[in-house]
Every structure is written in C-alpha cells, then in structure tokens.
Image (cartoon, rainbow, N blue to C red):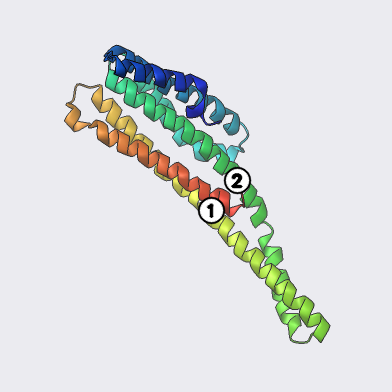
Amino acid sequence: MRPFLHPAPIACLLIAVAGAVFRNVPMVVLGLLCGIAGVGLLSARKGSDEIDSLSSEARSLLRPVQRLVGDIGSVRDQNGSSQAVQILGGEALADGNEFLGRAARALLTREQGKRLLRERDGIEKELSAARMNLEFATESERRMLEEKIRTRTANIERLAEVARGMKAVEIGLSEAEAALATIKARLAAMTTGERLADAPREDIRETITRLRSIASTFDETEKAFGKE
C-alpha cells in the first residue's frame, strides 16, 4: 500500500477538509501537517527496509540523496513556528522519503542488471561462432544455427536495454540530488528572514513535482527488466 493511501493520512485529510468547511484555519493546518507527517513517516519506514537490502556500492550511490532528505527534515524540525516551512518542508520530506524507497528498488534492479551483463561476453562469443559456422553448415545445421543467431541477437538487444536502464538510475539519482539541494536551499532561505519573493513557495512545489517526475523514470528501469 502506498503511504498516502494509508488510513492515517486519509483521516488527517478529512480533518483538513472539515476545517475548510467550517472555516477553521487552525484545523485545516493541523490536518495538513498531520497528513504530511504521516505520509513521511510511513514512507521513511518502508524506504529504510529497502535500503537495508542494498549492497555497499548501491548505498554509496544513494547516500547523497539520503543525506539531503535528512537535512530537509532538520530544517523543518528546527522551524516549528513557521507554518510555511512546516507544510512545504513536510511535503518535501514525505516525497523525499518516497523517492528513497523507489530509488532503493531501482538500485536493487540495477544490481540484478549487473549480474545479467556479466553474461554478455559469453553470448557475444556464441553469436560470433554461430555466424562463422553458418558458412560451412549443412541444411539441418543451418536451421539450428540461424535459430541460435536469432536468439543470441535478441539476448544482446535485451542486455542493451538493461544497460540503458541502469544508466537511467544513475542519472536519476544525480538529478534528484540537485532537486533536493534546491528544495533545501529554498526552505533555508525562508527561515533567514528573506522575503518570500526571494524563495517563492511555488518554486519549492515545482521542484517537488520535478522530484516525483524523476522517481517515475525509475519505472522505465523496471520495464527493462520485465517488471511491469
């Protein structure tokens, strides 16, 4: 179950809706904050389990993103008096934790890809040998060799898709690191007394949307491995 479909965040959303109906602003804010915090907590718990399953190399790739998500949480926690920071920071933290979980799954898929790519040299050698033997093959041998060539060519094309998916994971992590660094800087600017025009809320929300878009690209990696 996705965190935002859990009963707790839904209950908080209903509180916020009720507050809006009765024009009770504190109730709306409370509902939003509780809902965002609930999603963040559930996402963090799920993501932590998946991160624990990663290899040391995969964890090192994820660590910069993980650190920035923690920094965003610290900015939010240290500015409890600012409703804007609480709401935007909480939203960013929830999406950051959700991203960590999806990135961890993508990295697990990447590790499977690395194991598959170790077979590429052997497949290429078999393909080369089959093409060489085709010239001197009998009719029955030719049919077998042609089938082998088709199969091994398809295998190599499949591995090329896997390699592209693995690269997409690395690019996505770099882009997410940049997005989270931007969110962190915008939130920090809001806590230093700078005008909101210098750190517009919409910029933060647009960057959060960008983070969600990056996470969705990991679905392409899953497809490359046949994990629809």
- What mark, if any, has residue 139 been given in the picture? none
- Label 2 with label 1: CB-CB less than 8 Å: yes
Is residue 183 left or right of 136 when viewed as pictured? left
Q: Position of residue 12 (x, y in %)?
A: 42, 18
Q: Residue at x 19, y 21 (%)?
A: 193
Q: Residue at x 26, y 15 (%)?
A: 23
Under mark 1, the amino acid is Gly
Is residue 31 or residue 213 the one in the foreground? 31
Q: Position of residue 222 (x, y in %)?
A: 57, 48
Q: Secondary structure at mark 1?
A: helix
Q: Residue furthest front?
A: 21
Q: Is residue 205 above or below residue 151?
A: above
Residue 41 visible? The answer is yes
Tell me the residue that label 2 is attached to.
109
Q: Position of residue 63 (x, y in %)?
A: 49, 34
Q: Position of residue 31 (x, y in %)?
A: 37, 17
Q: Residue at x 57, y 54 (%)?
A: 224
Q: Residue at x 28, y 13 (%)?
A: 24
Q: Secondary structure at mark 2?
A: helix
- Neighbor class of circle 2 (other Cα within 10 Å; few <14, some 14-19, many 20+) is many
Is residue 18 or residue 133 the one in the foreground? 18
Is residue 75 left or right of 126 when viewed as pictured? left
Count the labels in the image.
2
Tell me which numbered mark, 2 or 1, is placed earlier along the sequence.
Answer: 2
Is residue 126 left or right of 7 when viewed as pictured? right
Is residue 119 or residue 223 the one in the foreground? 223
- What mark, if any, has residue 165 been given in the picture? 1
